[in-house]
Image: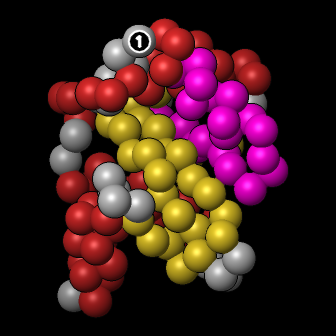
């Protein structure tokens, strides 16, 4: 289940962001959180796995016709393409009128997801 960020989820977002290699310092995580908060076009979405545990995070930016995936984070034990695709499928249902695209960091996963939809 994918849920849009709200202030109650701040600690969860901090914990999930800390799993990414370039986010291992609290100052960097705070900067990232502030950057998302500074614009209505940027949002976090948190993902709960089938056991109802917080397990993933998507950082997105609305770019007119596209939705740019800036962050895609899953807890290490659940990081599979299948789970990435589940998150993106749920996001696509929220943004029906947008094409989901990846940033440099997320492009490979987004391209694989796009190809999997054609199969």
The residue located at (19%, 47%) in the rendering is: 80
Q: If the image is split into quadrants, where does the C terminus sit? A: bottom left
Please tell me whether residue 119 is drawn above or below residue 69 in the rendered image: below
Residue 48 location (% of width, % of height): 47, 35
Quadrant housing residue 50 = top left
> In front: 46, or 30?
30
Vertical position of residue 62 compared to residue 33: above or below = below
Residue 35 falls inside the magenta stretch: yes
At a point 64% along the width and 19% down the height, the residue shown is: 10
- Tell me where residue 115 appears, x and y as whole percent: 25, 82
- Magenta stretch: give its range: 29-51
Can I make out residue 101 in this image? yes
**x, y (%) of residue 89?**
45, 65
The residue nearer to you, when weighing 41 against 112, is: 41
What residue is shown with label 1? Answer: 25
Is residue 85 in view?
no
Q: x, y percentage for residue 84? A: 32, 53
Classify residue 5 as left or right of residue 45. right
- For the point 65% across and 22% down, the residue is 9
- Is residue 41 on the magenta stretch? yes
Task: Left or right? Give the position of 14 relative to 43.
Answer: left
For the point 77% across and 38% down, which residue is it?
38
Front-lying residue, 68 or 25: 25
Q: Secondary structure at mark 1?
A: loop
Disc 1 residue crowd, few under 14, some 14–19, many 20+, Cα 10 Å:
few
Residue 35 drawn above or below residue 91: above
């Amino acid at each position: 289940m994918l849920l849009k960020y709200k202030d109650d989820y701040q600690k969860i977002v901090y914990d999930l962001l800390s799993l990414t290699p370039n986010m291992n310092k609290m100052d960097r995580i705070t900067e990232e959180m502030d950057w998302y908060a500074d614009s209505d076009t940027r949002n976090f979405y948190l993902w709960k796995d089938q056991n109802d545990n917080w397990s993933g995070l998507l950082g997105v930016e609305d770019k007119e016709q596209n939705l740019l995936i800036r962050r895609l984070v899953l807890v290490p034990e659940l990081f599979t393409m299948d789970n990435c695709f589940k998150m993106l499928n749920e996001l696509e249902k929220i943004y029906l009128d947008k094409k989901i695209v990846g940033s440099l960091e997320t492009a490979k996963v987004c391209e694989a997801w796009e190809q999997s939809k054609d199969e």
